[in-house]
Image (tube, rainbow, N blue to C red):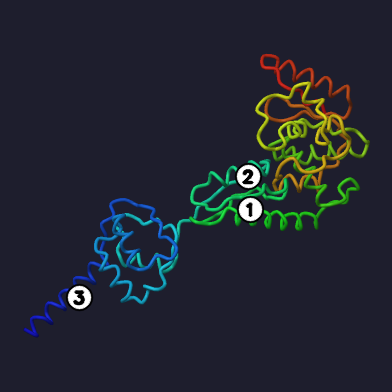
Amino acid sequence: IVIAAVIVAGGVYFWAQDKFRVEGPLRESRAVVIPSGAGLKRIARILHDNSVIEYPWLFIAGARYESAHRRLKAGEYAFPARVSAQAVVAMLRAGRTVIRHVTIPEGFTSRQVVDVLNAAPGLTGVIERTPLEGSLLPETYDYSFGDDRASIIQRMQGSQNQALAALWAERLNNPFISSVRDAVVLASIVEKETGRADERSRIAAVFLNRLRLGMRLQSDPTVAYAVTGGARALGRPLSRADLAVDSPYNTYRVKGLTPGPICNPGRAAIEAVLRSLPTKELYFVADGAGGHVFARTLGAHNRNVAKWRRLRKASPQSIKNK
C-alpha cells in the first residue's frame, strides 16, 4: 500500500510539473486585470475565469513551489495564446504589465488635454482643476492600467519645466523675450499659426519684428482663443465681429503679447521662438497649400492676400491679414 501510494504520489507530482509547464488553455491572447490587493486564490480564480489557466489549484501550488505567491503584482497583463501556468507566474512575479500610451498633440489647450485624459481608458481619478495654459508638454506618455490622471498631468508639467530650462539656457538674446513665460506665450501663437516645421522659426521672426516696431501681432488664433476661452476649437472661420471682440487676447486690438499662452506649444515651437531666423519680414498669409507666403512690405503682402483670395474664392474663409 505504501509503495503504491508513493508511486501514485510520484505520478501526480510529475504530472503536475508537466501540466504546470506545458501550454495552457487560452486560445487567443487576452488582457486581464489583476486588481490591487488580490490574494493568491483570487488571482487564480480570475485567471481561470478568463481561461488563462486550467487548474486553479495547480497555479496556486506552482506559485508556492517557486516561492512567488507573495510577489505577484497587480496590474493589466496581456497573456499570449497557450501561455503556460509557469509563464503566467513569471509574468505576474516580474510585473510585466501592459504599457498604454496617450498622445497629446502640439497646440492643444489645457482643456483639450484634460478631455483627452478623461477619455483615455484605464486611467483613474478626476482632474479637478484645468492646468495653466502652456504648462504641459505635448508628447506621447506611457501609463499602466489604474494610473491616476492627476499623475499624468504632473508628468506633463515636469516635462515642460525640464524642456523650458534646457531651451532657455541655449537661447539667443532678444529684448522682447525677457522671460520663459514670454517665450511660451509667443511659442503658443506660433504653434497655432503653422503646423509646418520649416515655417515656425520664420513666423516667430515675423512676430518678433512686429514687437520691435510696436506693431500689433494681428494673429487669428489669438482671436479664436478670445472667443472660446480655450475650452474648444472655434470650428468656423473668424468673423468681423470676432476681430472686434474686446479681449486682451485679441491681438488685432491690443499691442504686445497676450496675457498668457493660448495653447500648450511643443518643444519645436519654443525653440523656434528662442532661436528665430534673422529676417526683416513683417507679414505672412496662407498660400492655399498648407503653408504661408511671407513679405517685407505691405504692398507685397496685399498682393499675396489678393492671390490667396482668388485661390479661396470658391470657399471664402477668414484672411490672415498679418
Point out residue 303 in the picture as x, y percentages from the top left corner.
82, 19
For image coordinates 29% across by 56% down, the residue present is 49
Point out residue 75 in the picture as x, y percentages from the top left corner.
45, 60
Q: Answer whether labels 1 and 3 touch (C-beta < 8 Å).
A: no
Disc 3 marks a residue whose amino acid type is Tyr
Mark 1, secondary structure of its residue: helix
Q: Considering only order in the chain, which callout, 2 or 1, is on the residue closer to the N terminus?
A: 2
Disc 2 designates what residue? 113
* Dot 3 alpha-carbon crowd within 10 angstroms: few under 14, some 14 to 19, many 20 or more: few
In space, the residues marked 1 and 2 are separated at their CA atoms by: 9 Å
Mark 2, secondary structure of its residue: helix
Q: Is residue 282 left or right of residue 315?
A: right
Disc 1 marks a residue whose amino acid type is Ile
Q: Considering only order in the chain, which callout, 3 or 1, is on the residue closer to the N terminus?
A: 3
Q: Nearer the viewer, mark 1 or mark 3?
A: 1
Point out residue 205 in the picture as x, y percentages from the top left corner.
83, 39
Looking at the rendered structure, which numbered label has been put on residue 118?
none
Q: Nearer the viewer, mark 2 or mark 3?
A: 2
Residue sitting at the far front: 128
Quadrant into which the C terminus falls? top right
For image coordinates 85% across by 52% down, the residue present is 179
In space, the residues marked 2 and 3 are separated at their CA atoms by: 55 Å
Disc 2 marks a residue whose amino acid type is Val
Of residues 37 and 291, which is closer to you in this image?
37
Q: Is residue 295 left or right of residue 80?
A: right
Disc 1 designates what residue? 153
Quadrant into which the N terminus falls? bottom left
Looking at the rendered structure, which numbered label has been put on residue 13?
3
